[in-house]
Amino acid sequence: MANSSSMRSGRRSKLKAEINVVPYIDVMLVLLIIFMAVPANETPNVVNLPRAEKSTLPPDTYIQISIKPNAELSIGVHGKESAPAENMDNRAALLARLRTLHQDNPDYPVLIAGDRESKYEEVIEMISEAKKMGIARVGLATQ
């Protein structure tokens, strides 16, 4: 027995006081990838758009451009000096008429009335064209 106890004391191993962090890093990287990938795959089903309130005082006289979903365009002056709306076949004719109306009445703001089913791109392009002509007040007609 003395022999066995002396062997034990001679072969005594030291306990390691280190923490192996490699498995923890692996787990954290997997969790990070999961949390980054899951929200990217979810698409919102409903987009809540803001509603427009009526402005305090709408302009008395203005130039109105109407955009219908079937690409029908019309332009006219509304208010004190009302003129009948003219239907236009294409965008170039409408822009030429807008240029002449703006030159005749530089103080009139422009309201663009885009139908619900009309393309958003057409409305934005019309706003851009009006701004390029130097029209300072361009707005959207709402209901």
Image (cartoon, grey):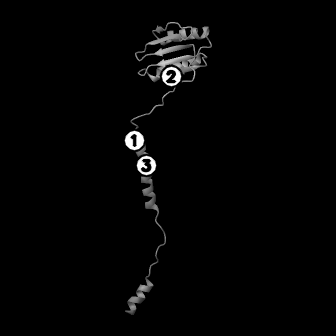
Residue located at (39% from left, 93% from top): 2
Residue at 42% over, 57% down: 27
Q: Position of residue 89 (x, y in %)?
A: 45, 9
Identify the secondary structure beneath mark 1. Answer: helix
- Which numbered disc, 3 or 2, marks the residue closer to the eye? 2
Q: Which residue is mark 2?
A: 124
Indicate the secondary structure of the residue bearing disc 2.
helix
Indicate whether 48 appears above or below 20: above
* Residue positioned most to the front: 56
Looking at the rendered image, the quarter that the N terminus falls into is: bottom left
* Kind of residue indicated by mark 2: Ile
Q: Amino acid at mark 3?
A: Phe
**Residue placed under numbered mark 1 in the picture:** 41
Q: On the image, numbered disc 3 is attached to which residue? A: 35
Q: CA distance from mark 3 to mark 2?
A: 37 Å
Task: Judge left or right: residue 135 versus residue 123.
Answer: right
Counting from the top left corner in percent of width and height, residue 30 is at 42, 53
Q: Position of residue 37 (x, y in %)?
A: 42, 45
Asked which quadrant contains residue 129, the reply is top right
Q: Earlier in the sequence, mark 2 or mark 1?
A: 1
Residue type, numbered disc 1: Asn
Answer with left or right where residue 129 lies relative to residue 7.
right
- Sequence-wise, the earlier of marks 3 and 2 is 3
Residue 120 in picture, x, y percent from top left: 46, 23
In the foreground, 22 or 81 = 81
Q: Is residue 28 above or below residue 120?
A: below
CA gap between label 1 and label 3 equals: 11 Å
- Disc 3 residue crowd, few under 14, some 14–19, many 20+, Cα 10 Å: few
SS state under label 3: helix
Q: Residue at x 59, y 15 (%)?
A: 133
